[in-house]
Image: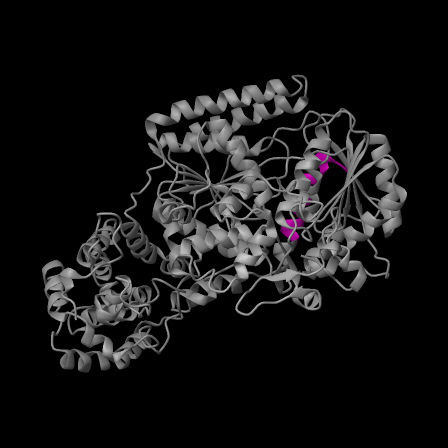
Amino acid sequence: MIQLEDCWARPPRGDRQLLLTEHLEQVAKMASASASGTEARELYSAGLLHDIGKARASWQAYIRKQSTRSSNHAFLGAVVFFWCWSRPNVTRPERYRTIMELTCDIANHHGQLSDLREEPPWWDGWQRTALEEVDWVGIAHLVHRCCPYLPPIPTDVTVLDRELKRLPYLWQEWLEEWFDPRLKLNEAVERSMRIRTACLIQADRFDAAQLALDPGIKAEEIPTVRENVRRFIQSSVRTQSESSPLVAYRKEVSQEVLARLETLREPSSRIFSMELPTGSGKTLLALQASLNLLEQRGGGRMIYVAPYLSILSQAADVMSRATGMEVLEHHHMAALTNSTNDEILREEDLLVQESWQAPLVATTFNQFFRALFPLRAHESMRLAALSGAVVVVDEPQIISPEAWVLFVKGLEQVLEVYNGYAILSTATLPPLDVGKLRRRPLPLVEKPPPLPSPRYLLRCGDHPWTASEVASKAIEEAQELKTCAIIVNTIRDAQEVYAELQSQAREIDLYMVTGAMTAIHKGHRIREIFGALRDQASERVIVVSTQVLEAGVDLSFGAILRARSLVPSIVQSAGRVNRHGENPVPGRLWIFDYVRGDGRSSREFVYRDKINRQETDRLLTPERELVEDEVTPVVGEYYRAVFQRHSYDSVLQKFIHAANGEWSAIGGLEPFEAEVPTVPVFVALAGPTESALTWLDDATVKAMRAFHCETPGQLFERYVGRGSLSRLDFNTRRRFMSLLLRFCVNMPVKRVLQRVERYENRSIVKWVDLKEYSNETGLAHLALDEGGAYFL
C-alpha cells in the first residue's frame, strides 16, 4: 500500500509531477463548475472519486515502470461513488437515475458507454484484492474534507468489503424504481443527452493533459476577421468575370441573409435554415452569418460540419484563407492534416483535436454524430465545445432519414443546453418538423431570389442506357460543351462505362475517381481533374465517378450524365453543371436508368428504400424536362411525399429507451445507412510504379518521415513488425494508423480473401499483386472480373 498523498496520477513531465490528490480535486472542481445545487455536489464527488483506483499499489507500480502489468482502476471509483450516494437519507428517489448514470460514467470513463443493466457497472472489473492495495484512511480523509455532505467511508477493509457486497441488490432496486416507460418525448430527450458525462470526461482529460479551454474567437477580434472575409470575397470576385450573373446574385443573397440576422437579435429558435441553390456561395455566406451571430454574443467558436473529407478539406481551406486564421480539422485522418512539421503530434495536440478546442473547427458528420450520440466516453467531451458556438451543418440532406429525425431533435436539445446556434446549409433541406422540435427553425432566406438565368436543363432519358450508350452520349456532350462528368451508382458501373469510353473516346482526357482507389490516389486524381478543368488548353475532358463528386466539391462541367438515384442526390449533381454560370448557354443534366451488361440495374443495391425510389420515379418520369427554377418545387414535393408515407414516430421512441438506461438505442448513431462489411486493404503504391511517389501530398510525406519511412512498403513492414505497435504510445499509434489508412482501399471481405496476405493480430491486410492495381482505376476492374454488386 502507498500513502494516498504520495500517489501519482500520471508519470512526471520534466520536473512537473501531477499527484493523484491534486488531479482528483481539480477534476472535481472542473466537472461541477457549470452546475449548481445537488447536481453540482454529485458531479464534484464523481470527479473526486473517479480515479481513486489509481491509488492501488499495483497501478502505482505500473505507472512508475516498476511493473509491466497494468491494473483496472475505474471500477473502484464507481463502486465507492455509488456506496456514498446510496446510503440512507443521502439521495432522494428522483435523483436515483443521475447517481446511477454517473456511476456508469466513472466505470466507463476510459471505454465504451454502457447501458444501465441489472448487473452494476463495476461488476466486470471487480477485484476483491484491490481493496487491500489502497490507503482507505487517506481516501476517507480526502472525501470528508472535500465532500462533508457524504457519509464517512469505512477505513477497515473487511467492513468496506461487506458494505460493497450489498450494493448489487440495492442497484437492482433503484433500477426498478426510477424506470419510466411513460416518459414524454421532450423530457426523454433532455435526459438522454450526455451533458454530465461530458462535464466529467472533459475535466479528467483536460486536467491530465494540463490543457486550458479555448475561448474561441474573442469579441475584439471579430471585426478584423469580418474585414478579412470581406476582402477575400472582393478578391474572389475580381478573379471571376465581373459580368458573371452569379456575382451579383451572391451579393444580393448575402445582403439579405446578413440583414435578416440583424433583425434576429433575440431569435426564437436555436436552429436556422439556409436553403439556397448550389453555387450560390453558401460556405462563405455561412461563415459571414456565423461571425455576425458570434459578434452579437460577444465571441465564441464556429464549427463547420461536412459529410465527406473532400468537402471538408476544401471548405477548411477557403475558411482559413478568408479569415486569416488556422482551421482545426478533425476526422479519422486528422492526426496528419493538422501536423505542421515532421514531429509526432503531442498528446495535448491530439486532445485539442478530439475536443474541438480552437476558434474555427471543421469536422465530419461521423465525428459530430459521435459528439451528440457518443459511443465511447472520450467522444462526449466534444459537447462542451458547443458552448456559445455556431455550428454550420453543410449538405445535411445526405443524412439517412431515420438518423435525420434523431439528429435534429438531439441537436436542438444540446444547443439549448449550451446556448449555441446551428445553421443548416443546403440546396435541398429535408423537413425539420419530423423531429417534433420545440421551436420552429428560422429561415435565413425567406424565399431565395430568382437566378438571373437558368444554369442547366434537366432531361430524363426515355429508355434504359447501356455502357455503350452512356459513353457515346458523354462523348457527344464533351464535343459540344467541352467537359462532361458521368456519375453512376456503383464502382462496377463506373468501371463498365470507363472501359467503354477507353474504346470509343479519341483526343479526350479521361479520368475516373471512385472508392476503389486509395485515399492518396483519389486525392491526386481530384487535383488532376481540377487542373484539367481550369486549363484552357485542355481539349475535351470526361470524368467518370461514383457519388464522390456529387456534393460540395467545387467542380463545374458543361454536362453531367447521372444514373437515376434519388431526387436530393440528383439535385446535388445538378450543382456541378455550369456551377458558376460561366457559360451563358445552359448546361445539361441527363438522368438515365443504367442497365449493366448482365441486364441488371444496381440502383436498388445503393438506394434501398422502395418509397424513396417510387417518389423519385413519380416526379422524374421518362422524357420529362425541367429548367433550374422548376427543380426546387420538385424537391419540396419529394420530401413532403416521402416523409408523409414513412412514419418516424417509432424512431423518436429511441430517446425514451435511452432515457430509461438503454443508451445503445442511440449511442454510436451513424449518419449514413449501413454498408456491406469491408476490410481495409493496404496497397503499397504511391505512384504509377513501386518506386514512384507522385501521388503523395505534403502532409503524407511529412508523416512518413516522422516514422522514418520513405516508401509505403516500409510503412507496412513497420505495421506488421513484431512488437512495433506495442512500443508506440496510444496517441502515436493513432497517428501511425491514420497514415497507414491513406494507402488503403476498403473492400468487401469476400472479394479479397484470395488476393491478400493476412497477419495475426492485424486488422489491415496487404494486397499481393501490385500489377493488379490500375494507375487509372485502382481496383475497380475487379468488379467486372468477379461480377455481382460491388460498391462502397
Residue 637 lies within the magenta run: yes
Residue 517 location (% of width, % of height): 68, 51
Q: Is residue 93 left or right of residue 492?
A: left
Q: Is residue 445 visible?
A: no
Magenta span has 763?
no
Answer above or below: position of 151 versus 623.
below
- x 22%, y 53%: residue: 18
Q: Position of residue 398 (x, y in %)?
A: 60, 49
Is residue 254 visible in this depiction of the protein?
Answer: yes
Residue 74 placement (x, y as % from top left): 30, 67
Closest to the observer, 340 or 514: 340
Classify residue 23 by image quadrant.
bottom left
Q: Look at the image and name its color scheme.
A: one colour
Answer above or below: position of 134 versus 460: below
Looking at the image, which is closer to me, 154 or 87? 154
Q: Quadrant of residue 236?
A: top right
Q: Quadrant of the C terminus?
A: bottom right
Q: Residue at x 75, y 33 (%)?
A: 456
Left or right: 385, with 45 as reference point: right
Position of 312 relative to 682 (above/below): above
Q: Position of residue 344 (x, y in %)?
A: 43, 46
Stretch of the chain drawn in magenta: 626-641
Q: Is residue 500 left or right of residue 646?
A: right
Instruction: Locate the N terminus by quadrant.
Output: bottom left
Q: Quadrant of residue 695?
A: top right
- Decide whether the magenta segment is chiefly helix, strand or loop: helix
Q: How many marks?
A: 0
